[in-house]
Image (tube, rainbow, N blue to C red):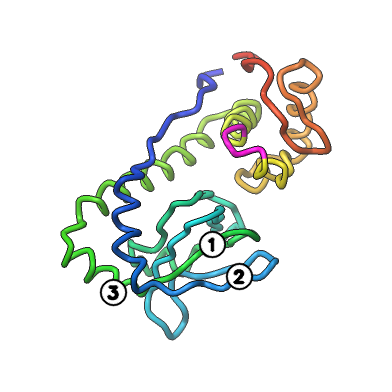
Amino acid sequence: MGNSIKRSIIEKPLESIHRLMTAFVSISKPYLLDSKNIEARLKGKDAGFDVYLLTKGRVDIWREVDNRLVETAFAPSILGLQGSVYRSHHYHLKFPAGAEVSTIPLQAAMEIIESQSLWRDVFYYQGYLNDRQLHHESMLINSSTYEIVCLFLKDLSHYSDSERAKLSVADYILQRSNLARSGVMKVLADLRFGGYIDIQHGKLIKILNNFPRNY
């Protein structure tokens, strides 16, 4: 087994995010959500780019080509500052119930950033997003099913109790990887039987012990 089972710590630049959100909030508009998951795109077919400000809850980012959940962002988060045509065509956002979101046109956001000299904060935040994407990709490259399952379990363990209570462990892993369900379920069963994880009704309660390096 070539890779050690560990979780990279990527520090979120909260001060930069708060400065950007404070600058944007005065002209942002609430994005209305109902009790169901709402999908959104960074750019409509006949509209300009929008920037989404997540102030409560989480947002899931899905890739169109394989219907893969590639990232989950928690509040506070800002999405859409890249203004990328490629991303707008190949990715969409899904806001679970309970999320609080507002939007601002990308052009207006750029004008605020320029007028208030906030480019350094944009740079720090975009660097964080790039690191998160690289972290996700590195988890899936040259890793065994066991290693991937363990890494996703560690990521899931950092969710709040209330968020974990909404998520099936198996679905959490399968939606973010190309692993076979049978392989994932076998690893989860073995880890549970070995006393490494506490799973009840399909939900992760707690990681009880460090995962063994070899499987």
Numbered mark located on residue 33 in the image = 2
**Label 1 Cα crowd, 10 Å radius (few <14 / some 14-19 / many 20+):** some
State which quarter of the image contains the N terminus.
top right
Note whether 135 is above or below 113 in the view shown.
above
CB within 8 Å, label 2 to label 1: yes
Where in the figure is residue 134, as x and y percent of width and height?
41, 41
Earlier sequence position, callout 3 versus callout 1: 1
Earlier sequence position, callout 2 versus callout 3: 2
Note whether 197 is above or below 45 in the view shown.
above
Residue at numbered disc 1: 100
Q: Nearer the viewer, residue 77 or 176?
A: 77
Which secondary structure lies at badge 3?
Answer: helix
State which quarter of the image contains the C terminus.
top right
Count the numbered circles shown. Answer: 3
Magenta stretch, residue numbers: 157-161
Tell me which corner region of the image, top left, top right, bottom left or bottom right, holds residue 38.
bottom right
Earlier sequence position, callout 2 versus callout 1: 2
Residue at numbered disc 3: 108
How far is the residue under mark 2 from the one under mark 3?
Answer: 23 Å
Note whether 209 is above or below 64 in the view shown.
above
**Label 2 Cα crowd, 10 Å radius (few <14 / some 14-19 / many 20+):** some
Tell me which corner region of the image, top left, top right, bottom left or bottom right, holds residue 47.
bottom left
CB within 8 Å, label 3 to label 1: no
Which secondary structure lies at badge 2?
Answer: loop
